């Protein structure tokens, strides 16, 4: 394999979920497919970090009109959204997943990371002060904690509950349970417990 192709495979392999074989497949596709695909992809990647930045309000992906303007995402600029309802997520892809479901009518706040002592992420590393400022600025009345049902996600949710508990807010935690189409026999005890505690009347 030529040196340039080796470098490209090495770079692609750094992407999450992409191993060396998948990276080679991507490379071969780009070399054999319509040349405009590789050219357009390369052009967009060169400008990506200059034109896509975190939203100044929530941390979601945003594309400002020019380099000097604040980046404000589509969710924050949508005046039909209920700004008194705020959903706190750990990462941007959690926000995207919730948006895909169409169930959230409010706005978001992206923490950017989760509490994780093993990785050296403590309470002081989370943007709790910025979250409190956002709650006060937008007169938020309800906060939904939508961190993942993992050890780090649970620890983060408990920390936020403690920090926000005295603000007179309605605090809620998303339920987790058996996924649609899943078999009960494969559900772990925590998931099964959440499924029962989060049950709804029929």
Image (tube, helix red, strand yellow):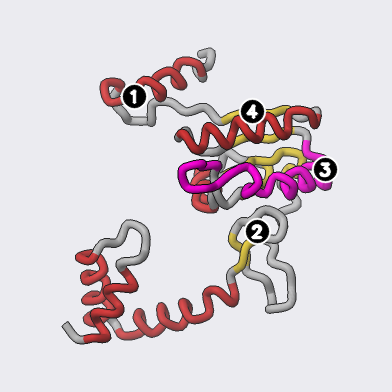
- Residue 97 picture location, percent across and down: 49, 46
Nearest the camera: 45 or 122? Answer: 122
Q: Residue at x 41, y 81 (%)?
A: 42
x and y percentages locating residue 57 in the rendered image: 72, 56
Give the farthest residue toward the left.
1
Q: CA distance from mark 4 to mark 3?
A: 18 Å
Counting other residues with Cα less than 10 Å from the Cα at mark 1, is it few (<14), some (14-19), or many (20 or more)? few
Most common secondary structure along the magenta stretch:
helix
Q: Residues within 10 Å of mark 4 (few under 14, many from 20)?
A: some
Q: Nearer the viewer, mark 1 or mark 2?
A: 1
Q: Quadrant of residue 50?
A: bottom right
Instruction: Say which element carries label 2.
Output: loop
Write down the region rendered in magenta: 115-140
Say if the magenta span includes residue 36.
no
| Residue at the spot of label 1 | 188
Q: Could you say which quadrant of the image residue 115 lies in? A: top right
Q: Residue at x 22, y 69 (%)?
A: 25
Crowding at dot 2, Cα within 10 Å, few <14 / some 14-19 / many 20+, comes out as: few
Which residue position holds label 3? 136
Measured in 3D between alpha carbons, the distance from the residue under mark 3 to the one under mark 2, in whole angstroms, is 21 Å
State which tag comes first along the sequence, 1 or 4: 4
Distance Cα–Cα, label 1 vs label 4:
23 Å
Residue picked out by circle 2: 74
- Mark positioned earlier in the residue sequence (1 or 3): 3
């Amino acid at each position: 394999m030529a040196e340039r192709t080796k470098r490209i495979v090495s770079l692609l392999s750094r992407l999450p979920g992409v191993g060396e074989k998948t990276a080679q497949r991507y490379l071969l596709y780009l070399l054999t497919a319509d040349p405009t695909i590789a050219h357009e992809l390369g052009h967009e990647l060169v400008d990506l970090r200059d034109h896509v930045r975190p939203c100044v309000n929530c941390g979601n992906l945003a594309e400002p009109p020019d380099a000097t303007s604040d980046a404000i995402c589509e969710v924050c600029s949508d005046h039909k959204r209920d700004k008194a309802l705020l959903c706190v997520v750990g990462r941007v892809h959690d926000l995207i997943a919730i948006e895909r479901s169409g169930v959230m009518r409010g706005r978001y706040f992206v923490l950017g990371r989760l509490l994780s002592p093993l990785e050296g992420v403590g309470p002081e590393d989370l943007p709790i002060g910025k979250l409190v400022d956002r709650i006060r600025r937008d007169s938020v009345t309800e906060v939904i904690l939508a961190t993942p049902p993992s050890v780090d996600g649970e620890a983060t949710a408990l920390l936020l509950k403690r920090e926000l508990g005295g603000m007179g807010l309605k605090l809620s935690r998303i339920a987790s349970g058996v996924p649609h189409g899943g078999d009960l026999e494969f559900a772990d005890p925590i998931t099964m417990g959440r499924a029962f505690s989060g049950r709804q009347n029929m």
